[in-house]
Amino acid sequence: MEVDEMEQMNGSSNENGNSDAVPELDDAPPPPNVQPSPIRTGIKLKTNSISEDTPDDQTMITDTGYDGMQAVSEDAYVGDNTADESMGTLRLPEDSQETLDGSRIEEHNNETLESSDAGNNGIGGDVEVTPKKSASKRKLPVDGEYDPSSPTSENENEENPSKKAALSGSPKKDKEAKAKVLPELEKYWKAVKDDPADFTGWTYLLQYVDQENDVEAAREAYDAFLSHYPYCYGYWRKFADYEKKKGNKDQCEEVFARGLKAIPLSVDLWIHYLNYCRAAHADEEDFLRGEYEKALDACGMEFRSDRLWESYLKWEVEAGRLLNVTALYDRLLATPTQAYNTHFESFQAHVNENPPNKILSIDEFLKIRQEVLQQKKTFEQADAADDAAPPGDDLDAPPGEESEQVKIAKNDEETTAVRERIISIRKKLHSQTVDAVTARWNFEEGIKRPYFHVKPLERCQLKNWKEYLDYEIEQGEVKRIIVLFERCLIACALYEEFWIKFVKFLQGLKDGDWTDNIRDVLRRACTIHHPKKPSLHLFWSEFEESQGNYDKASDVLCHIEKLVPGMLQIVYRRINLERRQGNLDKASELYEHYISNSQNKTIVVNTAVKYARFCWKVQDDIDKAISILRQALETDKESSRLYLQLINMEMERSPMNEATIIEILDECISRDLEPEQKILFAQRKLEFLEDFGSDIGSIQRAQEEFQQVLKQCKDRKKKSDDKG
């Protein structure tokens, strides 16, 4: 598998603005809010997504495997639109964008565009940019065929006869039509079917179906690819955009739902989905708020989730729901995120720019106002005692007789005091958040690649993840620990130890039932990311058996055995699973199956020994046990282990047959065994006759035989050393 172009796998954008990834063409945010390190001043987070190896004059690499891409080398996938893209490019509004090579572009004549949610440095920071005059629509080919890379409207199906005909072909002729329309499709499919781990082959397949006008072929390709790489959030976005471009609203929303279920911690995917919802469900306030709440519940605790919070805040601000904005700030200020300082500054601006009674609930406003008035009254009384005015010079006028200037001054003074009190209360919460950010800052700085990648991680990053997880576990906040584990499993999905660490953490939780969570983690590990890892499957089987789900435990073992045949650990686990359930006949059947059908002598010998012990100790049938060993010796007559086990069982018989045991030992000594093995059997024979022999002559002959075998072995070893 090619691994150097892995930004493709993640839609060519860094999930949370890290330094190793390249932003997607359709979602290239301006530099987000970057906070100074709470530990060392002068440290700046690497939140923009340019590869560390990217030259200064090349600031954007487009995504691969998307609309309009041309074939490129296997070493790198570099788009042909890099000249017009830069790190400062603001995204255009979602509802006015068309798809072009993964980007969303709308043509304007001498107009300015508002930046999208992802590009705002605060809540209402609209920025004007001048559209590029060079943008122009691509033409349809001369022959009238549909060009998927042209910025056509979603209703083009009605205007383009060839496209409409391709989508509404006769069911009987679908296969023939597909062969004619997509003549190269089978070639691309063959590459990935032969090697499902060939990521480069998948990207070629996807870019091919993107360029062609066959919805079913595109869906089949995307579904297959995302079943192998569900953490590639950029391709979920592309799949949804593809359905949207075709005018398939239901399918588009279904793709979003599947993608968000597969990678719920993707801030980028959530924002893309919410922008879609704001355009498609603009008048459904309750629905939109519910979707924003789902997003915050899924990834609001992600350290780099600032853009999601800001999008939610901006939506509430634009609708003038100031009370909701304050409530949302209360939650955000208590959450350690990357832009913690900017959020507090934005909150202060929110308080200072709006009437206090409009941004607070009635109860909180009246309470704070009462505190302010009480404090003011105390100060006034103290001032009056220190500097009493002469009789008749009281400056206070009777109620209702104050001048307008006095009224305004009093109201302004009171409002200012109330605002200061509101900010002061939240500042305590912000201070606690600063402490939490400070404790995690070094760990977050150590995360250089927060997205999925098949290329191995550096040891320092693996160590950083382990130490970060251990730190969060010590803090004891379960939800935050789980979020961090899920973040870790995106970046470290190909490292099985992190999956097992997560499962063991969940198993150690005493409060609540975490069975479904554990099963879900093991399912993802075994069926998606590590389908051929026996250790994880054995772990999953153990868990299911501990839950009394014996059928599922057996299914897991059978599945991994098909993928990794000939592994003794799996053989033993399958047999003993049946034994522990009391299915002794099934266990015997499995023993015999492996002994009879295995082509591997090691498996035959070891399974035969286990089966003989099973018959001897579990079924109390020593004759059958000895018979099993003798049959196994016919397959492998040089196996010392089988002979030793056979001797041991013959000695356990009652009454013991001395002649039979001596016969087995003599047979072993006569075999062409290793010198050490011959000495072992000669010694065993001598010891047996000393302990149980009935004839002194046989003991003397055994002593002579032992000395002779010992001498032969020494001579053989000496010759071998001389040759060496």
Image (cartoon, grey):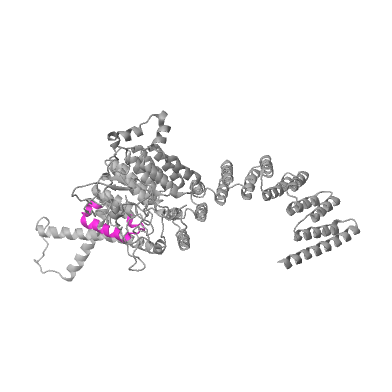
Image spot of residue 208 (x, y percent): 39, 43
Say whether residue 422 is visible.
no
Query: Is residue 348 rendered magenta in the image?
Result: yes
Q: Report the predominant secondary structure element of the magenta stretch.
A: helix
In the picture, residue 285 is in which quadrant?
top left
In the picture, residue 258 is in which quadrant?
top left
Q: What is the residue that sits farthest to the bottom in this orientation?
A: 386
Q: Nearer the viewer, residue 422 or 661?
A: 661
Say whether residue 417 is visible.
yes
Query: Is residue 477 rendered magenta in the image?
Result: no
Q: Is residue 703 above or below residue 568?
A: below
Q: Is residue 386 above or below residue 137?
A: below
Across the whole image, how many numbered discs are drawn on residues? 0
Left/right placement of residue 516 relative to residue 35 reads: right
Q: Nearer the viewer, residue 106 or 319?
A: 106
Image spot of residue 264 (x, y percent): 40, 48
Image spot of residue 571 (x, y percent): 63, 47
Residue segment shown in magenta: 332-359
In the rendered image, which quarter contains the C terminus?
Answer: bottom right
